[in-house]
Amino acid sequence: MTQQKTIAIVGGGITGLTAAYYVQQTINNKQLPYKVTLIEASDRLGGKIHTMKQDDFIIERGADSFLGRKQPAVRLAENLGIEDKLVRNTTGQAYVLVNDTLHPMPKGSFMGIPIDLATFFETDLLTDRAKERIKQELVIPASNVEGDQTLGSFFRYRFGDELVENLIEPLIAGVYSSDLDDMSLLATFPNFLELEQEYGSLIKGLQATVGERKQRTGKTPGQFFTFNDGLETFIIHLQGAIKSNVDIVYNQVTSITQKGDQYKIQLKQGEQMHVDVVMMTTPHHVMTDVFFANNAFAPLHDIPVKSVANVALAFDAAAIDGELDGTGFVVSRNSPYRITACTWTHKKWQHTTPEGKILLRAYVGKPSDQEVVTLSDEAIIDIVLQDLEKTMGITKEPEFAKVTRWCEQMPQYTVGHKEKISGVREEVANSLPGVFMAGSSFDGVGIPDCIGQAEEMVEEAIDYLLGLNESIS
């Protein structure tokens, strides 16, 4: 007979909540006598998913959507019975800001990488010299770098500097709030390396894969999903699904130590818990802090973090001359602006904004400008408005503006990241049996990545507990 076991999930963001949900589903399906507790240090669940509503606007203070082609998030929505609440982004012209001009994003490309050269070269975003350099990519030999390398070095080798700095970098690095010349190729976009190695050219590889998919499916619909009442719908329904079977404790974990075959969890307010399994879903620096008595997590100290902030601004439609034609813009790293991108939210996510209003969301905090995140709300708003005046001609004050900071919350996947995480997992498995980890610090920062990691972690943890019972019997 399976014995009573206790599981603690530390961290109440999307990873921790997903773990709690799938653990409970497994316990119910297999009729296991396990007790589950979710511990969250703050006074709210959801982590970087945080929806607020004001004056009939729906405003995302953190993540605003997830990539639909990554199945874990869609699968979770289906399991929760909320797939009917999903909405796709409206597609439209996007822009890149280079040399004080908003250039339409070149057609015939994938994440800034050319696929249809004839269509792509219609852009005036790039010089003739840059276009000639791009053509050379078709004959440049596949790279022979052993091990990991930066995305910057990989793309510069294939395309030269101009395409990388004016288009690829603002599109790709922004996802990770990172610098392309620091980012690990193997930990972020290993598929690009695989295509290059297989086809001898990244352009040829994308033509053979992405190009064929577009021909089969025709016009591509919006690639991103959110919910019609805000992304926090995920959090609300996850919390509702687990509340009757999972204890939720709002407290801070100060230490976790081994006590025989169990783990003692010390909470800030004095309480203690003894559990058989610990699932860590917090930022990586929390893991090194709470497991200070064990060096298994020590290499995580070396993972850098960055800070970012976003500003949601609401305007009356009259604040902008003419109709905004598109969904927003990203900013070239060579441009003298402090914003890194601006989403025209009312166009991209039309359900978020009342009739006759405009909702924008601008981002600050590029790797070379971390200081901006520490400024006052008023100072950040002023910086954003100055940049928007220069780029979009907005001169009127917003009806309201909301600043959200994520200070030292963006893990950086630098060269060697994948190997480092693999080593930590191996050491934790050996020296801390029954401890598991998942989240944005490890195998992907997007919502589907975190959900998928949680699914895998739950399977490993349940297998571990069932193995303990078999060894006892």
Image (spheres, grey):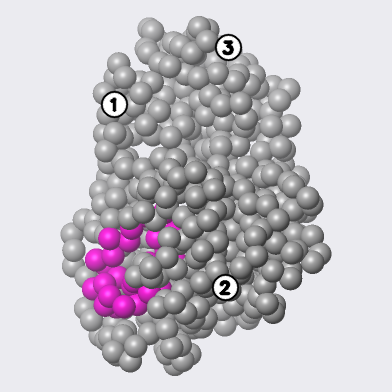
User: How would you rate the neighbour count of disc 3 (Cα within 10 Å): few for under 14, some for 14-19, many for 20 or more?
Assistant: few
The numbered disc on residue 296 is 1
Residue located 50% across and 50% down the image = 379
- Whether residue 257 is situated above or below residue 179 in the rendered picture: above
Instruction: Examine the image and state in which quarter residue 160 appears.
Output: bottom left
Element under disc 2: helix
Toward the right, the furthest residue is 355
Q: Nearer the viewer, residue 281 or 314?
A: 314
- Amino acid type of the residue tagged 2 in the rendering: Met
Left or right, 54 with reference to 283? right
Say if residue 471 shows up in the picture: no
Between the C-alphas of marks 3 and 1, the distance is 28 Å
What residue lies at 30% left-to-right and 70% top-to-bottom?
155
- For the magenta stretch, what is the residue range? 152-181
- Residue 358 x %, y %: 70, 64
**Label 2, on which residue?**
392
Q: Residue at x 37, y 12 (%)?
A: 258
The x, y position of residue 384, in whole percent, is 52, 59
**Is residue 163 part of the magenta span, yes or no?**
yes
| Mark 1 neighbour class, 10 Å CA radius: few under 14, some 14 to 19, many 20 or more | many
Residue for badge 3: 4
| Image height of 58 relative to 250, above or below | below
Question: As rendered, which of 145 and 403 lies closer to the eye?
Answer: 403
Quadrant where the N terminus sits is top right
Q: Earlier in the sequence, mark 1 or mark 2?
A: 1
Type of residue at label 1? Answer: Ala
Q: Amino acid at mark 3?
A: Gln
For this rendering, which residue is in front, 285 or 399? 399
